Image: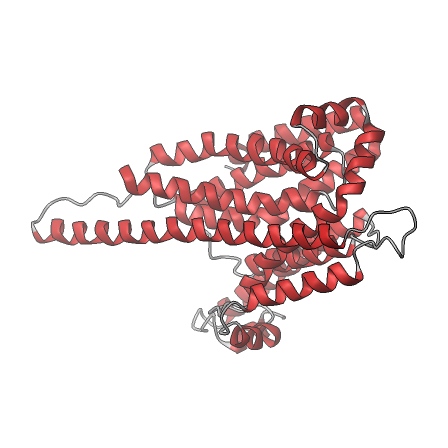
Amino acid sequence: MVLKTFGWSFAVTALGLVAAVLIGGWTAFGIVLILSILEISLSFDNAVVNAGILKKMSAFWQKIFLTIGILIAVFGMRLIFPVVIVAISASLGPIEAVDLALNDADRYQELVTDAHPSIAAFGGMFLLMIFLDFIFEDRDIKWLGWLERPLAKLGKVDMLSACIALILLLITALFLAPHAHLHAGSADKTETVLLSGVAGLITYLVVGGLSGFFENRLEEAEEREHEAEEEARAKGKEISAGALVGKAAFFMFLYLEVLDASFSFDGVIGAFAITNDIILMALGLGIGAMYVRSLTVYLVRQGTLDDYVYLEHGAHYAIGALAAILLITIRFEVNEIVTGLIGVVLIAWSFWSSVRRNKALEAAGGKADPSDDKTEVSSGV
């Protein structure tokens, strides 16, 4: 079962790592490996969300998402999007950006380094909004209850996430952005950081708005489907398995693509905290994207989406840590290994907490309330 589901991912991993060694030796191997792990750790909750929606769709639309969808995810977001970021931030044409990346690595590195404050501000704000919206939402299941309970109460204040993000952006621009009078020979990046950060915030709000639109359409479609099922039961007709088809499935597919794009976006932006090499970035993120696909299929087939309930929390805390690191790197250098391992440690910690929680529930005969504070304590958190 595992080999059947993850076979293509294993093959792509082997090819990608071999290509990395051939391109840049063992240093490149390590960077691609870290990028792959980073993408997988950041996108695990993506796989969980995708699987929860995908299981409602018919076999045809599942196949569409797992074929056309992965092409959009890998080639559109992981390969093309980094080029677009570099081209826009460095005021280059896409072809010129690719040509520099392939044939003039030193010049490309210089342009990307100069554009790093805008890239980091844009990505840091986008990731920060994902993290803040998560921790300010009141959830039945809490991982770090001592922290998440008071934050959930604060989250009742309208637009709190955006206000905090803008305050942090202002602080970043004032104290972390390079200033001409402090750094001789360098351009003042205060305005660049502010504009890029606001652009990141706007992008998040637009993506969130689109996702909300499609989600509302899906809810309406599901309500109509439920009413049709009730009417069919009343007439004694045979009821289908409930897989969505037609317009409802199409809107679900669009919704999944918006979600997948938003989740992959943080991986792409986060990759700039690891490396500016577009080839290594594409290899690492491509490998990670394949595992997201495989994880989605595995979760759908196994039906075990709720087994490890803290993994989503761990992934979002990793996103928050990555957002902070990106903003810090506007002024200070952060070791790539530290950046990559923080996400892995948080995911591993949340997985371990989930396992302990499951054992505690099993010992209690499954009678404990998963949202109960005692369950949180017994999970070891």
Quarter holding the C terminus is bottom right
Q: Position of residue 120 (x, y in %)?
A: 71, 49
Q: Nearer the viewer, residue 303 or 90?
A: 90
Q: Nearer the viewer, residue 45 or 71?
A: 71
| Residue at the image position 53 percent from the left and 58 percent from the top | 308
Residue 84 is left or right of residue 226, and the answer is: right
Q: Position of residue 152 (x, y in %)?
A: 53, 73
For this orientation, the residue located farthest to the left is 235
Q: Position of residue 115 (x, y in %)?
A: 75, 42
Q: Position of residue 154 (x, y in %)?
A: 54, 75
Q: Nearer the viewer, residue 302 or 164?
A: 164
In the displayed structure, 293 sits above or below 164; it is above
For this orientation, the residue located farthest to the right is 184
User: Number of callouts in the render?
Assistant: 0
> In which quarter of the view is residue 243 placed?
top left
| Residue at the image position 55 percent from the left and 57 percent from the top | 312
| Residue at the image position 63 percent from the left and 45 percent from the top | 267
From where the camera sits, is residue 303 visible?
no
> In which quarter of the view is residue 131 placed?
bottom right
| Residue at the image position 84 percent from the left and 51 percent from the top | 333
From where the camera sits, is residue 343 visible?
yes
In the displayed structure, 157 sits above or below 358; it is below
Residue 34 is left or right of residue 380, and the answer is: right
Residue 294 is left or right of residue 89, and the answer is: left
